């Protein structure tokens, strides 16, 4: 368990594909895998040799789920996704499950 967020948004399939490509180009991208019928992207900072990644991301019907296993700001190390969404004029709302 970590700090969980959802970026509530509606993305077109092309936008989803482009965001997924951005995730895989991230310098701390570790692996993509399927769990519980969902695809996850895991991110691991250098030096993290533990079982848990630093960040896990999954796409859901109502947006993008983010779990920050180490805590921290929702966009930290995912700034390129935020920049993409702003450049595409994608409206979104951040749901902080800790609140």
Image (tube, rainbow, N blue to C red):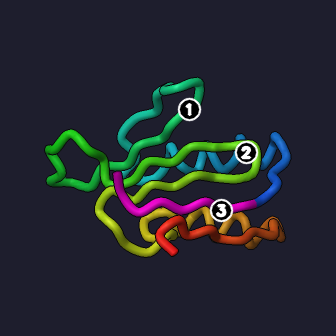
User: How far is disc 3 from disc 2 in space, using C-alphas?
Assistant: 13 Å
User: How far is disc 3 from disc 1 in space, using C-alphas?
Assistant: 16 Å
* Residue 70, percent from left and from top: 29, 62
Q: Main secondary structure of the magenta part?
A: strand
Q: Residue at x 62, y 68 (%)?
A: 95
State which tag comes first along the sequence, 3 or 1: 3
Up the image or down, 74 lies above or below 35; here it is below
Q: From the viewer's perspective, tell me whether residue 45 is left or right of residue 62.
A: left
Task: Give the residue pinned by disc 1.
Answer: 39
Task: Give the residue pinned by disc 3.
Answer: 7
* Residue 19, percent from left and from top: 65, 50
* Residue 62, percent from left and from top: 75, 50
Up the image or down, 77 lies above or below 40; here it is below
- Which element type, helix, strand or loop, lies under badge 3? strand
User: How far is disc 1 from disc 2 in space, using C-alphas?
Assistant: 12 Å
State which tag comes first along the sequence, 3 or 2: 3
Task: Give the residue pinned by disc 2.
Answer: 16
Mark 3, residues whose alpha carbon is within 10 Å: few (<14), some, or many (≥20)?
Answer: some
Q: Is residue 4 magenta?
A: yes
Q: Residue at x 65, y 62 (%)?
A: 7
Q: Which residues are magenta?
A: 1-8
Q: Residue at x 64, y 70 (%)?
A: 94
């Amino acid at each position: 368990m970590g700090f969980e967020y959802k970026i509530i948004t509606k993305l077109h399939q092309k936008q989803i594909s482009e965001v997924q490509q951005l995730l895989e180009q991230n310098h701390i991208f570790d692996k993509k895998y399927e769990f519980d019928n969902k695809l996850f992207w895991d991110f691991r900072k250098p030096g993290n040799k533990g079982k848990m990644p630093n960040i896990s991301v999954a796409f859901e019907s109502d947006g993008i789920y983010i779990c920050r296993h180490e805590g921290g700001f929702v966009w930290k190390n995912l700034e390129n996704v935020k920049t993409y969404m702003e450049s595409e004029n994608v409206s979104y709302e951040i749901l902080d499950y800790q609140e």
